Amino acid sequence: MSAREILLFGAGAWGRNHLRVLNSMERLAAVVDPSLRMKDLGAEFPHVPIVSHIEALPDDVLSRVVGAVIATPAATHADVTTQALSRGWHVLVEKPMALSVQEALSMEEEARKAGKQLMVGHILLFHPAVAALETLIDGDELGDIRYIYSHRLNLGRVRQDENILWSFAPHDIAVMLHLLKSEPERVEAKGGSWLRPDLVDLTVTHLEFPNGIQGHVFVSWLHPYKEHRLVVVGSRKMAVFDDLAPDGKLKLHDVGIDTDAAGLLKTRREGWTSVPLVDEEPLARELRHFLSCIDEDKTPLTDGRHGLQVLRCLDRAQATLDR
């Protein structure tokens, strides 16, 4: 094992994926999870120390820890992150990094004072399709960007401490901010609550970016089928990222509306091509990036500043929902 290892907090549905990948990289020191999942985890990962609280870990394990991955419930992110930073560890905290802008600002300040990296788990920015899409946009393959929209829909799993906006929308808002390299000038969301009056089940969030670029994010856990799709419409071409497609997850469509010699609008349909992608798991790319930021002392792609930008968008959207 490496002398520079990672401690995982939380081994729930998503935390188990972190456990699997970190273990395969031989950089996992131990898992801290107070739930009854520990017995099952111990059988599956017999060589990984799994404890209910950090004080149960021996000093020789803690001495190897240089960073922490925090995959606990969102309401605990701020507290667990602050505790990890106070121990002198770098932190990768799952999205949303906190449930308030003030908590996120405090987390950033703690990381700055500790001189440690604070990274937020916006995994889609490490998806090969998003990396390829960024290359297309930056290379002007699509022309001027006109609007971006995303659908992130499914039936369940309903969270208990965060609504659909805070659970699903951070993924796509993070991608939009990254691709457009700007924050929206205006954010507005509308939604509805049917399962519980205190938790919104569906939201449509509208974002207005500089240069007239529009964006909208439709998220719901009351939907008959699963859909993860992001569409970028440019003046020259359009791109579709369908994360659930068995292959050809990113397609470049040579379509649009042009003006002919007579000044009339004319539809152009030249077909589409599938964009080649690196065959690599996004979570593995994300964790390798976190480890390299620790080992090489470099700023993460999804650092606390970017996480805070996403949180500000969520906060502004939530404020319109609460009106």
Image (cartoon, rainbow, N blue to C red):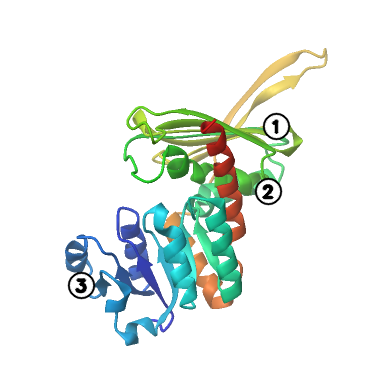
Give the mark nearest the N terminus, 1 or 3.
Answer: 3
Give the mark nearest the N terminus, 1 or 2.
Answer: 2
Disc 1 target residue: 236
Give the mark nearest the N terminus, 3 or 2.
Answer: 3
Left or right placement of residue 104 versus residue 10 in this view: right
Q: Which element type, helix, strand or loop, lies under badge 2?
A: loop
Disc 2 target residue: 181
- Residue 174 position in % (x across, y down): 56, 47
141 or 208: nearer the viewer: 208
- Residue 213 position in % (x across, y down): 69, 34
Vertical position of residue 143 compared to residue 92: above or below: above
Q: Nearer the viewer, mark 1 or mark 3?
A: 3
Contact flag, marks 1 and 3 (Cβ < 8 Å): no
Q: Which element type, helix, strand or loop, lies under badge 1?
A: loop
Disc 3 target residue: 46
Q: Estimate how packed mark 2 is, as few (under 14), some (14 to 19) or many (20 or more) residues with alpha carbons within 10 Å.
A: few
Q: Which element type, helix, strand or loop, lies under badge 3?
A: loop
Vertical position of residue 63 compared to residue 164: above or below: below
Q: Nearer the viewer, mark 1 or mark 2?
A: 2
